[in-house]
Image (cartoon, coloured by chain):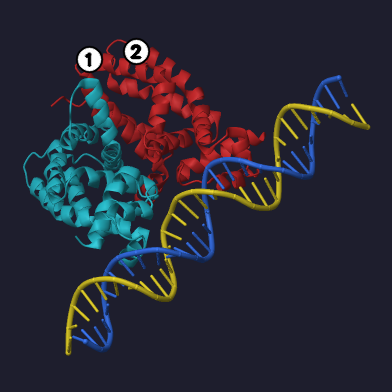
Chain colours: A red, B cyan, C blue, D yellow
DNA sequence: CGTTATTTCAAACGCTTGTTTAAACTGTAC
DNA sequence: GTACAGTTTAAACAAGCGTTTGAAATAACG
């Protein structure tokens, strides 16, 4: 395995658990068993490393999401639950791409939104607009009465629900296990959150 | 104004915008126009300062929330929308307690959940269990079919929605203004998010 | 006023951070 | 076999962090 990939793997898992600000380059290079200076040599800076970690997932995920959303958009009598369910398979496929891929990616998403004051939001909306556009189109078809502004807000609420849940999913899964004797994995969490956000977006307009 | 309160006010607004990790004691004491060592003299440590900032709000808010939830719990044919709406007035009353109080408090809540790996969750659930208990009771009455475990998950989804929305509410309000020519304040955001989370919790069980 | 106790202050402490340097090492091509 | 680009290495850098120190300033009280 190349030095570059060793760094990416170590950075990914540490970022997911501790956040970007909370993880030092020394932790990363130590876990990756490479020299400290290797990060700056291969990536230039910590910020570029963060981008690289996110890009590795987004490049894998975004074509899958786009085609799933386009497919769903062609159905008759489309429901919001169907739209949101389109995310399940692409997200879970990240587990074949990399071990703990789904969980890591969603946690990284959460970290990026809160850690770095909006830099990741800019990164995603400018670098991967196709996913967002197709998603908006699908939601519009399933719930045409929703105004553009109301949709804007509800989609951000949804983003918040997912991102926040995933960034604390380890803790939540532990509690569920000890309080309800119910062992649940990341796929289980996703299947619980989908009906919630679908109902939220489908809420009647006040 | 006392040094202690000058520090609390400066810390509050900086923490809300930049998070706990992202704000240094030097920034705080500089904005408060007090000496750097004053934080450690009056509060002992940065961690204790964070607790003090949160306590100032929770001590104000928790009795209001508790009585509002108890009142709502006595109604006949209670709906989830009514339960969640019980939060609106107590939260908005924080604006009379302090300028930008509502926004600051909710943003702090968000920061605490993601910045400090669960320390704030522990702090709230152990220090202010009355609010949570009454809230659970009300939800149970409005939606008795919901199992304890499903409720656990959906309440955490709700927490995530609110907390995430509020920690990025400044950015969202800016976008809403520029994209839809619609100036919205924190009260407006709350009134938009309440129907969303109420519908999410009320979602049919799969 | 004089004597405590409390609060402020500048300076330094030890530590960690991201980044840079220049030398050593590796492998490939002429 | 020597030259050269690519890579790795240990060491140091400057800057920022939370915290501590001991003396100066202020307040409170008999």
Q: x, y percentage for residue B28?
A: 33, 53
**At 37% from the left edge and 45% from the top edge, which residue is drawn?**
B114
Q: Is residue C4 above or below residue A146?
A: below
Q: x, y percentage for residue B68?
A: 11, 48
Identify residue for label 2. Answer: A73
Identify residue for label 1. Answer: A144
Secondary element at image label 1: loop
**At 8% from the left edge and 39% from the top edge, which residue is drawn?**
B77
The answer to whether residue A199 shows anywhere in this view is no
Q: Is residue A63 above or below residue B192?
A: above
| Chain ID of residue with mark 1 | A
Q: x, y percentage for residue A141?
A: 27, 13
Which residue is nearer to you in this view: A160 or A182?
A: A160
Secondary element at image label 2: helix
> Hey, which quadrant is residue A28 in on the image?
top right
| Chain ID of residue with mark 2 | A
Which residue is nearer to you in this view: B177 or B108?
A: B177
**At 33% from the left edge and 20% from the top edge, which residue is drawn?**
A83
Looking at the rendering, in which quadrant would you find the N terminus of chain B? Answer: bottom left
Q: Is residue D24 left or right of residue A127?
A: left
**At 6% from the left edge and 44% from the top edge, which residue is drawn?**
B75
Q: Is residue D8 left or right of residue B164?
A: right
Mark 1 to mark 2 CA distance (whole Å): 13 Å
How crowded is the residue under tag 1: few (<14 C-alpha within 10 Å), some, or many (20+)?
Answer: few
How crowded is the residue under tag 2: few (<14 C-alpha within 10 Å), some, or many (20+)?
Answer: many
Q: x, y percentage for residue A138?
A: 32, 16
């Amino acid at each position: 395995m190349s030095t570059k990939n060793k760094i990416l793997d170590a950075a990914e898992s540490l970022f997911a658990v501790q956040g970007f600000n909370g993880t030092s380059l020394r932790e990363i290079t130590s876990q990756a068993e490479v020299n400290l200076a290797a990060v700056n040599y291969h990536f230039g800076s910590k910020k570029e490393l963060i981008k690289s970690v996110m890009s590795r997932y987004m490049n894998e995920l975004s074509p899958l999401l786009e085609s799933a959303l386009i497919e769903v958009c062609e159905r008759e009598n489309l429901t919001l639950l169907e739209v949101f369910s389109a995310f399940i398979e692409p997200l879970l496929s990240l587990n074949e791409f990399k071990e703990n891929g789904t969980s890591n990616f969603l946690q990284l998403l959460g970290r990026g939104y809160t850690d770095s004051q909006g830099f990741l939001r800019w990164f995603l909306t400018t670098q991967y607009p196709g996913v967002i556009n197709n998603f908006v189109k699908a939601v519009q078809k399933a719930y045409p009465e929703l105004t553009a502004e109301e949709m804007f807000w509800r989609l951000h609420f949804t983003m918040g629900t997912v991102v926040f849940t995933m960034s604390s999913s380890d803790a939540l899964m532990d509690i569920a296990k000890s309080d309800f004797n119910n062992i649940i994995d990341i796929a289980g969490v996703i299947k619980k959150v989908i009906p919630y956000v679908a109902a939220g977006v489908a809420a009647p307009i006040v």
